Structures are given as structure tokens and as C-alpha cells.
Amino acid sequence: MTVQLNETHDVKLGSWVASANQPDSDFPIQNLPFAVFRSKAGGDFHIGVAIGDQILDLHAAYAANAFSGFPSLQSTEVALALQSNSLNALMGLGAETWSALRLALSRILRAGAQQEASLRSALVPQSDAEYGLPAQIGDYTDFYTSVHHATAIGKLFRPDNPLLPNYKWVPIGYHGRSSSIGVSGQQFRRPLGQTKPPTSDTPVFGPSKRLDYELEIGIFVGKGNELGDAVTIDQAESHVFGLCLLNDWSARDIQAWEYQPLGPFLAKNFASTISPWIVTLEALAPYRLAWDREQADPQPMAYLDSADLRTHGAFDVQLQVSLQTQAMREQGVAAQSLSQSNFRHSYWSVSQLLTHHTVNGCNLRPGDLLGSGTQSGPQPSEAGSLLELTGGGKEAISFPGGEKRIFIEDGDTVILRGWAHKPGCARIGFGEVSGTVLPARTL
Amino acid sequence: MTVQLNETHDVKLGSWVASANQPDSDFPIQNLPFAVFRSKAGGDFHIGVAIGDQILDLHAAYAANAFSGFPSLQSTEVALALQSNSLNALMGLGAETWSALRLALSRILRAGAQQEASLRSALVPQSDAEYGLPAQIGDYTDFYTSVHHATAIGKLFRPDNPLLPNYKWVPIGYHGRSSSIGVSGQQFRRPLGQTKPPTSDTPVFGPSKRLDYELEIGIFVGKGNELGDAVTIDQAESHVFGLCLLNDWSARDIQAWEYQPLGPFLAKNFASTISPWIVTLEALAPYRLAWDREQADPQPMAYLDSADLRTHGAFDVQLQVSLQTQAMREQGVAAQSLSQSNFRHSYWSVSQLLTHHTVNGCNLRPGDLLGSGTQSGPQPSEAGSLLELTGGGKEAISFPGGEKRIFIEDGDTVILRGWAHKPGCARIGFGEVSGTVLPARTL
């Protein structure tokens, strides 16, 4: 887990794609995140890299010999990966290849690059593109890394016992559903299910009345590990392809009734939505922070500890949730911010999640997705879910035009955004992930 | 969900494959289960059907024009499915195609069939074959359908609250790990992990000391459903391709420490092992039983209820666990039976599991696997795990030669078997699933 700055991070670099040089662009030449996209007019999905308001089509760039001057990208495996319709193959090639590709992309997209003329036709405006899932997600695991979220939720579900004794020892996680993961723009029906009103001895069946979002970071596994092997904490980040935004939609009323003793199931698996763009760890190198444990807390067990953690185990990524009701959308009113948080507050590091996941020999595969769990900050206003922001569904949030929300209503769109920025460094944006709730299926 | 007997179930049918006509064969011509296999000498995986001690290679049978006389099998989709290296495509074609294929297989393998001469070369002895996973398993869900198991385990984890209030309303399930599912013969390392000894305030790290098996039925999803749609209970069985045996290995000490509040994770995801053969629901038609609820129990909610349940919602499938220690294996001592149970005891039906899974709009895909949960019967001796058979790890089981077991030790092989049999009907066997525990990875 080495974090080194190199020429690709130089804040002075500009691109021949002019929109990438705007200071508020999420996608300057220092970012270079990956997605799977195609033209809105149809056609095959290709891998692309964001640059300003454009996408560099890597299939087209490969065909235009853009990478011919880079010896470490001349293998058949790289050629196949760049021409694939998903990122799984590239993810499986490992950190050295990702880094070599990043360097090549930086050089060919840089202002003055000789490839400009041949690559102009490999650009697709983001406004003309639609996105696919970036990878075939074999398994999806969701963690629970915000101690602030765990404590707040724990108070609601178990007032006398909010934070369980294992929380500060075990990076708590559980398996989620991969089939229902969609990409930004996903629309899904409000789930039906069993819930038990507090006033009743028996459950009722119907649409969820407590539908919520969860503000999460998604972690895409790059290189996998064989069943029976484990990934040490010092190797863990070399197995991570990059990060995205993840909205882990949750039906709180279904969850409360079903989750004992085996965990959430139908309360979560009706939909999860991710952002199209995956930001590599290398792009985030300028935004690493020391990860630390309070003295009063248990220090991590040996397999979860590393000197590197103390210098740069965390990520300084700002996160924001906003919501636009159907009425706001119809009236042209912009989405309203509900909260902001930061991934730096995560109690467990990305490397700890990956290492813990494999310590028992569990095999990860390229394209597997790990969720960070809801990223609530230390302040109540930094909560990453409505359940927290409304005090357990008790205090409504007011919107322009007089609308109020306790939980999500039909037609609402929830938008998550993420970005890293500080003086002297280029802005590294995640773009956004949006999702819209449709009315429940008719019974 | 109609269960009809037809000519393929006729007990008087014999096959030109003589070994299929032995009364103790798991694979008479009335069974015709599917697997993915190849020669032990190597080569590509093909789909095959068990007949006696042989496998009919469906790729080879297709090439030999075995199905040319069956009009409903003449589509391109069927041709591609029969020549695939996994069962996903066939699973996705739906119940009418599976039934048409079964009829064709019954006719071409029947004694006197004119296809005998051309199909002899499409037979591969099971003793010369190795098996692959029958399908690419997109998502794996494990349920908890034995009320006897849930009560016994509940007593150990929550003595004052063994069966939770939701159990008799909700078919409790959770998502498991698909990457670590292996086929019979799987060998895996004893998992390492955090456990908290009752005598200590803090956890320790090391190999699991309470490694266990779980005797389960696996349910392979055939035709899927779109996200947002639900499968009604009367349609549910038409979405089930078939059943297999499943050993859901479990590390009880890791589970006890990690499972609150989000359920089992590393305690389960290091390995799960399934039998190679998938027995279709049509083959099991003679072994359907009424599914019933005790009067004192809550009756199923409307979406989980159906008149068909009361006539034939359950399956009469005998189940057996046996164990062979390394010493027994080296001395040529046969595996010793630990317990027997029956899938008929399941508190929830297969159709209820599938319908519940989709009622919130969750999409299932062909090849998804549902586990039944440990199938413990009503008697303590019918328990489907060591945790139950040893009274929570307190009473050792004795083996020939003086060995004792409380939990699984390194080198032990656990074998699950399943079969349906009654007078006047052909035996429908599941074969077996075996798995062997290797020593933990060195720290």
C-alpha cells in the first residue's frame, strides 16, 4: 500500500479537451475515472474514461493506435481488456497495468499531445451517452463502517444496546444482492412486503412506508484472490480498482420485521444504485489522510493493522445527498441538499475491509463490489440516511414549495455526489448517482 | 404449480443402459438429472444427464441428432443450450422446454429405442468424469426453513428467546456468497477468524475451533423475473429448474461473534459445496406431499398461500449425513452415518421461498441458487448439524476405532446423500455431495 504522487497528479497539467480545464470540472486530466457506456442512439457498450464533459472511448482509442507508444500496454490481455464491454478484464490485470494505463491516458490527453488529431473522433459527449454497469458484479458485500451511523441506527433498533460489543473489533459486513444493482438513472418500484406495525400483534402486507436511501462509497475489487488464500493488509489496496458512489436503498419497516436473526434481506435487495464512474485509488493519492483510532478504543487486531494506515489509511472524499420531489422536478426546482459527510469518518479503512473479507479464505473476483455502509459524519446534520436525519421518522424535513418528507415518496429522485478537493490539488470528482422511486406494483 | 404424472414416471420403464435398471440405482430412467461434467482426462465441460452409472453427453447426443424427432426441441435456443458448458441457458428456457427435453430423453434412453446404436458413443462412465458447477451462480440466498433447526439453534444463541416472533410469518433468508460455492469433492482450508471465548473480554484470532456442516437442499432457479415484477405462488414452481444437495459449512465460533446485527458473513462464506446432479421437479412429481400448517400456528399470508400447497406443496426426500475421518479413510473404514432427516419437515415450501424472494420486486436470474437452510427433523437424532447433534458442542459423538468428534477436524470428509423412494415408484436419487476440510492456512 504505497501512495506516491507522480506526473499524472501534477496540478499544472491541462488537457486538449478544453472542458477538462474548467476548475469546477469533476473530470480534469488528473482524475481519469472509468465507466462503461454507449451512445444514447444504441450500439455496443465500450469502456470509456471521463475527460471534462467528454468520454474517451477506449475501444476507439485502441483502434486508433493511441497506446502504441507504451511498451507495458502491448500484451494481448491489455488489448482484450480495452476492447471489452465491461471492466472485469481490466480489473483483473492488476495495479501495475492500471497505473501504466493511467500514465498513457494522461500523456495522450495532455495539452499538446501528438495523439490529439487521431483521438478527436474517439471522444463522445457525456450528454450523448448512456451508461451500463461498469462490471459484471459477481458478489456484492455491504459493510457498516460508520460508527456514527451504527450508533444512531442502533439507538433506534436497540435503545438499551446501540453499539454492539463486536463493532470496534470486527468490520461488520454482510452479503447483498448483485442482480438488482443498477447504474445511475435507475428507476424502481417501491417494494411490497411484510411489516409489523407497533400497534399490532401480527404483520401486515403492503408497500413499504419507510423507504430510505443510504449514502455509501462503493469499492470495486480489481485483482482477486484464490479460495483459501488471504490478502494481507499491506497488499489490500493493490486489489482495489477504484471507488464509486452507492445508494443502498432500504425499506426500514421491512427491515425491522425481517432482520432477526440473519440480517437484512428483502429490505435491501429490491435495488441498489451506483454511479457510472469508478475513480481509481491512484487518482485519489493526493487526498489520503491518516487513519487513526482513538486511544480509548481497541486498537486493530494484528491482521487489520499496518504502519501505512497511520500515515494514509483514509480518504478525504466529500459526500452529499440531495433530493428532488416530483413536484420540484415538474416546476424546475433544483434538488435540495439534505446533508454532507466525508468518507474520512469511516471507522474502518478500505484496506481493512478487503483484508477482513479474505482472512477466512473467501475468494474475491474482479468486479466484486464492496459497500462502505452509510457514511454518516459525527454531527447529526451529517447523517447519511433519512432515518437518522428525521430522528427515526419523527421530525419532517421541509422543502421549497411547502413539501415535507419523513421518508421517500413516489416520484422522488435522490442524488448522491462525491468529490475531493483542496488547495494546490486538482479536483477529483465522482460525478453523481441518481435514482427515482416509482409507485409500488398494484396488488 | 401443477404436478402431473406422465409416461416418463412409469415405474415399468427400463433403459438400454443396463445399470439404470438396478433397483438401487440413484439414476433410473425415471430420474434424468442434469450436471456439467468433463472427462477426467480433460477437455471441455458439457451438459450431461445421469442414466445408471453412465452420463449421456447432451452435446454429443445433439450432434448425433438424437433430438431430431422432437419438434418442440428444434429451436436455435435449445440447440445452443444443449451445447453450452453450463446449464444457465437451459434453465432460462422455462418449464415447457425442460419437460419436452425430459420426454425426449426418456424416449431415446428407453429399452428398445432406435437411438441406442447412435448414442452408445455419447455415454461417459461416471467413474471417468469430473464435475463442474452446474451453472454460473449469480446470487446465492440461504433460507432457514426448518423450525426444528431454528428452535434448536435459537436455544443455544438466545436461551430465553429461541424462536423469534417473525419466524412463523416470514420465510427468513439472507444472501450468501456465490464465489466460494464448489461442487462435490471440494477441499477447503479451515477458516481463520476472530472469535470471542466466553472466558475473555476481548476476541482472539486463529483457526475456527467449531467447524460444522449444514445439511441442506439447494434450489436452482430456472426462468428468472424482471426487476420490479414478482412471481406469484402459483407460478413459483415453474421458475424452479430443480433441486440438489448443499452443505453450507459453518464456523460456529466465528458466527457467534460476528453475526449481530447484520447476520452471518465470514462464518459461512469460506466454502459451500453442492452435489453435481440437479434433480428436476418433474422427476420428483411422485414424491409430493401435502404441505400443512398446524392449527395453532399462524396461517400463511395471502401472497404465500395457495390451494396447491395443501395437496402437494412438500417433497418427500430422505436426507442423510455421514462422516469419514482421515484415519477411517486410511484404514478403509466406511463413512459413518450421523443422522437422517427428510425435506418434508420444512416449515416453508419451495414455492413460498421463491415467491417471498420476489415479492418486493427482487429479480432472480437463471442459475441463482437458494438454500433451504439446515433440514433438521423433529427428533433430536434427525438434526442436520453437529452443533445440534452434540447439544451445542457438549456431547461428543463416538466413531469406530475410538475416535470422537464434537466439531469437524482436519482431514474429515462429510458426505450428504438424498433420495426419494416408495413402493410402486422408481427411486429418484440425488447422488451425493462430499467435502473435505484441510488444515488452516499457516499464520
Image: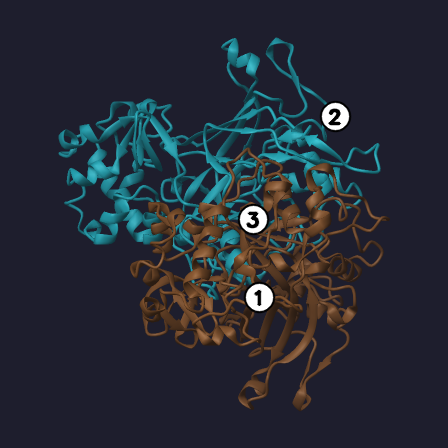
Chain colours: A brown, B cyan
According to the picture, the residue beneath numbered tag 1 turns out to be A11
Percent position (x, y) of residue B176? 56, 46
The answer to which of A264 and A170 lies nearer the viewer is A170
> CA gap, disc 1 to disc 2?
65 Å
Label 1 close to label 3 by CB (< 8 Å): no
Residue under the image location 77 percent in, 43 percent down: B158
- Viewer-side label of 1, 2: 1
Quarter of image, res A416? bottom right
The quarter of the rendered structure image containing the N terminus of chain A is: top right
| Chain letter, disc 3 residue | B
Label 2 close to label 3 by CB (< 8 Å): no
Percent position (x, y) of residue B379? 64, 32
Percent position (x, y) of residue B428? 39, 33
The answer to which of A338 and A11 lies nearer the viewer is A11
- Viewer-side label of 2, 3: 2
According to the picture, the residue beneath numbered tag 2 turns out to be B394
- The answer as to whether the residues below labels 1 and 3 share one chain is no
> CA gap, disc 2 to disc 3?
30 Å
Label 1 close to label 2 by CB (< 8 Å): no
Residue type pointed to by label 3: Trp
According to the picture, the residue beneath numbered tag 3 turns out to be B348
Residue type pointed to by label 1: Val
Q: Tell me the SS state at disc 2.
A: loop
Mark 1 surroundings: few (<14), some (14-19) or many (≥20) residues within 10 A: some
